[in-house]
Amino acid sequence: MFVEVALDLPLEKTFVYKVGDYVSHEPEVGKRVIVPFGSNDFLRTGIIVDLKEKVEFPEEKVKEVFDIPDDFAVFMENTIALAKWIADYYCASLGEVLFFFLPSGFEITESFRVSLIEENVSKIKLSPSERKIIEALQGRGACKVSVLKRRLKISNFYQSLKNLINKGVVVREEFIEKDSIPKKRFLILKESKALRGAKSKELVEFLERRGKVSVDELKERGFSLAVINRVVKEGVADVVEEKVTVGNRPQELKDLREIELTPSQKKAFEAVTSAESGTFLLYGVTGSGKMEVYLKIAKEFVDRGKSVLILVPELLLTPELRARVESYFGNRIGIFHGKLTQREKVSAWLKAVRGEVKIFIGTRAAVMLPLKDLGLIVVDEEQDDSYKEQQKPYFHAREVAIKRGKREKFPVLLVSATPSVDTYYRVQKGEIEKLELKERVSTVPLPFIKVVNLQDSKRTNIFSKELLTALENTVKKGEQALLFINRRGFFAQSFCPSCGFIAECEDCAVPLVYHRSEKKLICHICGKRYKPVYRCPKCSTRLEFKGYGTERVEEEIKILFPEFKVVRLDQDTVKNPSVGARLIKEIKEGKYDVIVGTQIATKGHNFPKLTLVGILIADLLGGAPDYRGAERIFQSIVHTTGRAGRFKPGAAIVQCFNPDLPAIKFAVEYRFEDFYREELETRSILNYPPFNKGVLVEFQLDKLSGFKKLEEKFRLLKGELSKYFSVGELIPAPIPKVSGRYRFTSFMRALNEEVLLSGIMWIKKTFPDTFRSFRYKIDVEPVRII
Ligand code: ADP
Ligand code: ZN
Ligand code: ZN
């Protein structure tokens, strides 16, 4: 018997090994296998991707498997086939894809240990090599295999070691700790005492209510380790370690009969639960009851004995969301995302393998979980860019989910108030069925949105009179306001702070990027270079190359309203998760009047006192200089203004220079379908995705002297590709040298998927693996082109 094995290497091919008599478990597709690899036979972990009865080349040349350590497969046959598609489409090797998803805790190298069972030695006959191994092990405890191998230098080392293991003379340690269930620390109330310090008091009170709480949850709730330790030291509570099965929170299960679905919710429920497969879009504004229906749909599948996977964007996987899902499914939920520890990941993966958990919530990394009898994948907020992996294999979890649904024949439910333009396009083409929730269930009205034209308004710096008045009134009422500003990119666009003019490429209609090294404005779609303009061509004001940052807004607000309590919520201030959790908790408690924040502030959290949202410069919400700018402006406006008045009626003020931009106009008037119609028309005219497939190719050079050669090769490639591709020029990155390498990009557009795949073949052919002087990466359907 032979097995075809995928290894974690950037090589296209897979490897064939012989399965000898002595392996711990039967070979099976999807199982882990430990194999010697390379000239020094270093042990590596692979995945069996196929079984073979015979091989085409001489059998003696085929190396033998060291072991098949598990009685279970870590990948299902279906997901291996899916991984092959990911590898082809997103341009990676099968091994790279499989090992990207498989938690690295599953990888075994030569660092495992073996030890001798002395009393068994005399019972058997030994070959010379086996004797050498035994002598080396005698009188010692467990020894690392890598050390043993290096010391002994015998040619048939693994064969001999395996024989000894099979004869029971040597034992190896388990490859997965049997007990891979992580332990968690809990605080248990021992004796109530009055402690000094507000935080300690609060913690004691909390423990009185709950009795037992995990340390993780306490941290999530904003209690610092110092406070927790103090409470323990004072004898109020004990710390215990316990194994965590799945959930550990007290359950307040909802009585499901309480909620009766509205007619359109019911229609959506029926469409998905009666479907055998197909992709659906659950579409409706915030508060239309989307989550409620998809949880009910999920429940229905679980009740039928199926498993269900709910994907959410990275920032949305908050304790609040978890609590809401738990209110439906109790403790039976699995969680899987990139920030878990290796042990937690292995443990979650095993729960899926063993079918112990029927319902998983996770981020993009969860899309390949080996869930048996998968009956449904929900992709919540399907438009969110965090579904796209930003490193190899660059997959998009929504696309993988849709493919998985087709392959394993189950429905996939995309959910959004503001679907991506891509998804909407597919709805129009009839590839996705739209299920619309027209009436809202929430009794709180959507916020009233007022647009302020910054060109007409009297303003102080960037604050219009309207916004300042609204701010004052809100704070006076004891409510909170959020001032929203886009996260600043590392590229510089030229922007007129007086009339809002943004320099754009005349062919591509995307903002130009200022390149300091060349002193040129460059279009990152086509590569065209422009002389920089330093004064606004419309109003002669001096142009700025950088936008407004949160810090500047915070400072200016503090100067304008010294009595306001202001907090900043951006990448910098929430870098430390426990600080972030504390700030969010304090905001909910009403400790601040004004929140100055980026996207981070607008995702996943409900701030009950927040009734006013101000967007400072809506025109700049497009961020990166590419064809998705309008889409991002539209999405940001809807999502940000939606934060106002979750619990009581709120208002939003959208400041902008161009109120007629469709992205702004249609967002503030809640005319979503009109936006999609116009945006698709524009994209079609300018020949942008979704009317074709975008590919970003990035080259990296160690030395600039290599550029000539790169350019030569690139010309050849361009000539070859331009039959079916539109290929942009080679463009240096705006910051040319990043971590010691010079980066150059080219943005390409392929007519369709078929052409795309053959184009990628050409790229690989022109720049073979062996062409070491520069590296390159290929990002298919990128969400960023810079
Ligand atoms: P969305 O996901 O569209 O923003 P949610 O599902 O969060 O909407 O629903 C908003 C609120 O309305 C939630 O508190 C939810 O429990 C409640 N809700 C949803 N559907 C119903 C219904 N049919 N009857 C009563 N309340 C509902
Ligand atoms: Zn101007
Ligand atoms: Zn251009």
Image (cartoon, rainbow, N blue to C red):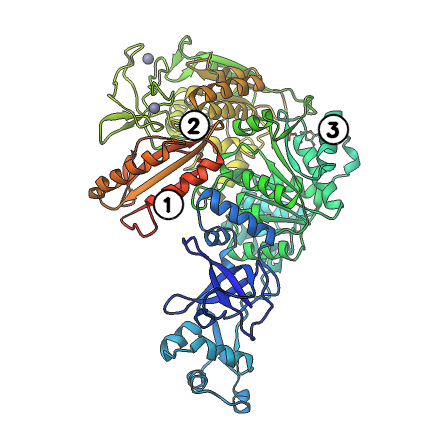
Disc 3 element: helix
Disc 1 marks which amino acid? Lys
Q: In the rendered image, which residue does mark 1 sit on?
A: 764
Disc 2 marks which amino acid? Asn
State the quadrant of the N terminus: bottom right
Disc 2 element: loop
Visible in this render: residue 142? no
Task: Please tell me which residue lies in front, 648 or 39.
Answer: 39
How far is disc 2 from disc 1 in space, using C-alphas? 37 Å
Residue 151's x, y, as percent?
Answer: 36, 78
499 relative to 167, above or below: above
Residue 408's x, y, as percent?
Answer: 64, 46
Looking at the rendered image, the disc whose residue lies closer to the viewer, 2 or 3, is 3
Visible in this render: residue 172? yes
How far is disc 1 from disc 3 in space, using C-alphas? 48 Å
Q: Residues within 10 Å of mark 1 (few under 14, many from 20)?
A: some
Question: In the image, which disc is placed on residue 535?
Answer: none
Residue 197's x, y, as percent?
Answer: 53, 44
Q: Earlier in the sequence, mark 2 or mark 1?
A: 2
770 to the left or right of 348: left
Looking at the rendered image, the disc whose residue lies closer to the viewer, 2 or 1, is 1
Residue 564's x, y, as percent?
Answer: 46, 24
Task: Please tell me which residue lies in front, 725 or 318.
Answer: 725
Contact flag, marks 2 and 3 (Cβ < 8 Å): no
Q: In the rendered image, which residue does mark 3 sit on?
A: 267
Residue 487, quarter of picture: top left
Disc 1 element: helix
Q: Earlier in the sequence, mark 2 or mark 3?
A: 3
Q: Earlier in the sequence, mark 1 or mark 3?
A: 3
Find the residue positioned furthest to the top.
Answer: 456
Question: In the image, which disc is placed on residue 486?
Answer: 2
Contact flag, marks 1 and 3 (Cβ < 8 Å): no
